Image (cartoon, rainbow, N blue to C red):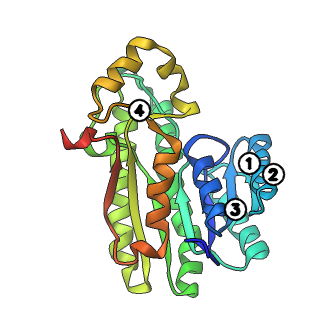
Amino acid sequence: MGRLANKVAIITGAAGGMGKADAILFAKEGAKVAITDIQEDKIQAVVAEIRESGGEAIGFAHNVASEEDWARVVSETLSQFGKIDILVNNAGISSTVPFMDTTVDLWNKIMSVNLTSIFLGQKAVLPHMIENGGGSIVNISSIAGLTGGSGAGAYTASKGAVRMLTKATAIDYAKHNIRANSVHPGYIETPMTADLMANDQMRQWFLSQTPLPRLGKAEDIAKGVLFLASDESSYITGVELPIDGGYYAQ
């Protein structure tokens, strides 16, 4: 029996990087996964990969900032799999635009994808988790949501807000046996960071900030998300888990 046997999970932003790693690991551990992304072709490729390995998966094109899209994803997941035990809010966008150069449109876009999406996702699944007698929500923040970050004010603000929204959710829904925790990745090699990592000077700077002698991989994050999603963490709620090679310890 896998660590997520008989569980149903929704994972957003799963066309690549950390979300894809979550989806593959969850399916390997016995979960039925409903995976979503704005990139429909790529999400269907991940579905095919999981099915070829013997897992159960469905995939949807999904604008996480749309309440209507969330209603559709939840409805179709319930129709296919009958319940929702786990929600992983992984979808997000990065920004390195300095604060004074950030336009209102860019600010709103970052907030809608990184923060409003989590509000909408939680709002969509919580009634079904309550009906089901419990569940686990894992919200992906960032190390910037714990320490702040130079040159990325809007991104940092959105990720800090994810941390506090998660805590509020944990407190409000603990009585329903619903847990909510946030994960805070450090410097991770993913498609979203590929351009930065391709710059050797930037890559060496990231390494210099990380006590462990390597950068993180998507699979490193997936293992932490799996723990928080599983019953192994049944007495853990409202916490933030840095997965950052020791960055936050400095």
Residue drawn at x 47%, y 76% as measured from the top left: 231
Mark 2 to mark 3: distance in Å?
12 Å
Residue designated by label 3: 34
Classify mark 3: helix, strand or loop.
strand
In the rendered image, residue 9, in percent from the top left (x then y), is placed at 62, 67
Give the alpha-carbon distance from disc 4 to disc 3, as whole Å.
Answer: 29 Å
Q: Report how far apart the C-alphas of labels 2 and 1 lie in the structure.
A: 5 Å
Residue type at mark 2?
Ala
Q: What residue would you read off at disc 2?
A: 48
Q: Where is residue 169 drawn, in percent x and y?
A: 39, 69
Left or right of residue 81: residue 117: left
SS state under label 2: helix
Kindly identify which residue carries mark 1: 46
Counting from the top left corner in percent of width and height, residue 39 is at 72, 41
Q: Do the residues labelled 3 and 1 touch (CB within 8 Å)?
A: no
Q: Where is residue 152 in the image (x, y as percent from the top left)?
A: 36, 29
Q: Which mark is residue 215?
A: 4
Check disc 1: other Cα within 10 Å, few if <14, some if 14-19, many if 20+. many
Front disc: 2 or 3: 2
Identify the mark nearer the N-term, 1 or 4.
Answer: 1
Quote the CA–CA distance across marks 1 and 4.
24 Å
- CB atoms at circles 2 and 1 under 8 Å apart? yes
Three-letter code, disc 4: Leu
